[in-house]
Amino acid sequence: MINYWQQNEENKIEKVKLSEMDATKRTWVDARIVTREDVELLQNVYDIDPEHILDILDPDEQSRLEDADDYLLTILRLPIFDPQAETQYFTCPLGIIIKENFIITICWTDCEVLKDFAAGRVKEITLNDFPAFIMRILSRADTTFLRYLKAINRRSTAIQNELQLSIENKEILLLLSLEKSLVFFTTSLKSNQMLLEKFRKTKIIKLDLDDIDWLDDVEIDNRQAIEMADTYRNVLLGITDAFDSVINNNLNMYMKRLSILNIIMMVPTFITSWYGMNVPLPLENKGKLAALIISGICFASIFITWFFLGIAERRFPNSNKKANANKQIRQTKEKKNDRRMKSIEKALQE
């Protein structure tokens, strides 16, 4: 789907039809959720290299700046939120091509950043300065990254509270999905950071003083997003490790109880199996008296085994003390991480 946008007399961008487009004005060609027909149109009308279009449509393409023969190609990474996807938070490449009076954006999916531009929710947009337009896209991308990172942190906190009540596979898989999203965000933000450094050093694209000021602000926001993503990821890894330890501890407790039950049941099983052999045995002709004696021996053996296991557990309580100490250490680390997250969120709000 390709839309065309031009700037009106009130300096606001508005959608125009291809037949009504003013050839003297600068035009934003917005290509989202591109089809095969859209790709052929971009190749034929704007003479874009098919290899560059394939690079833009590659979900794993990294950010870069390239000078083609008759146009300038910029590829950057944008955040995506799709509630229907397996990994709801991920990133995608956006290709920006500057050619003559046209700035062409190509994306294989739809995203909130481009929706904000099309809906007019981004202020001070101008098509008269294409480098400034790119800076606005990068700035909006960083803002969206920060908002999505806060949403990921809130979701991980909610899942953590649910896991404290009952540990289930569903919540653990959600934590792994959020961790995967943070990996995507960190990689994309670092790739965008390299692109920003290329903007500052290269002479391919000319930036005026206002563009350089915007570039400084975008770099600050991008570094902040990188630090937040790294911090949230480390916290999430700590939470995952803590719940892994809790699961292993619970499993050890269940295995300990089963082992005790197995040892207790082993003694009466041995006695009954001994008296169940097809050989002459004592008390064989005693009738009900033999059954009472054998039952008494079984109950006595169960009590004696249980008594000695209790004594051994009271004399060697180190394993339980170590487990409790490790649990207290994990709780202290989680509290420190929570306080750190709250301080970061307050700083961002300010």
Image: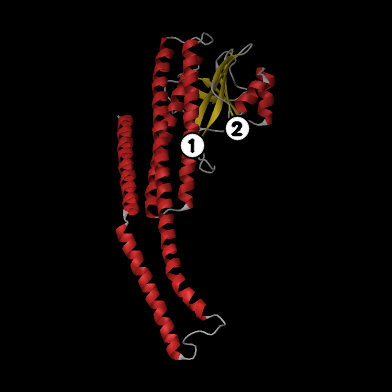
Q: Quadrant of the C terminus?
A: top left
Tag 2's secondary structure?
loop
Q: In the image, residue 271 lies at what x, y percent?
A: 47, 76
Q: Which mark is residue 181?
A: 1
Q: In the image, residue 208 lies at what x, y percent?
A: 44, 9
Asked whether residue 134 appears in the rendered view, the answer is: no
Q: Quadrant of residue 33?
A: top right
Which colour style is shown?
A: secondary structure
Real-space Cα separation, disc 1 to disc 2, in angstroms:
22 Å
What residue is drawn where x is 45% and y is 44%?
A: 175
Mark sitting earlier along the chain (1/2) = 2
73 or 334: nearer the viewer: 334
Label 1 CA crowd tier, 10 Å (few <14, some 14–19, many 20+): many
Q: Quadrant of the N terminus?
A: top right
Q: In the image, residue 273 lies at what x, y percent?
A: 51, 77
238 displayed left or right of 110: left
Q: Are marks 1 and 2 in contact (CB under 8 Å)?
A: no
What residue is drawn where x is 41% and y is 33%?
A: 147
Q: Looking at the picture, does residue 61 appear above or below residue 132?
A: below
- What residue sits right under mark 2 in the picture? 33
Label 2 CA crowd tier, 10 Å (few <14, some 14–19, many 20+): some
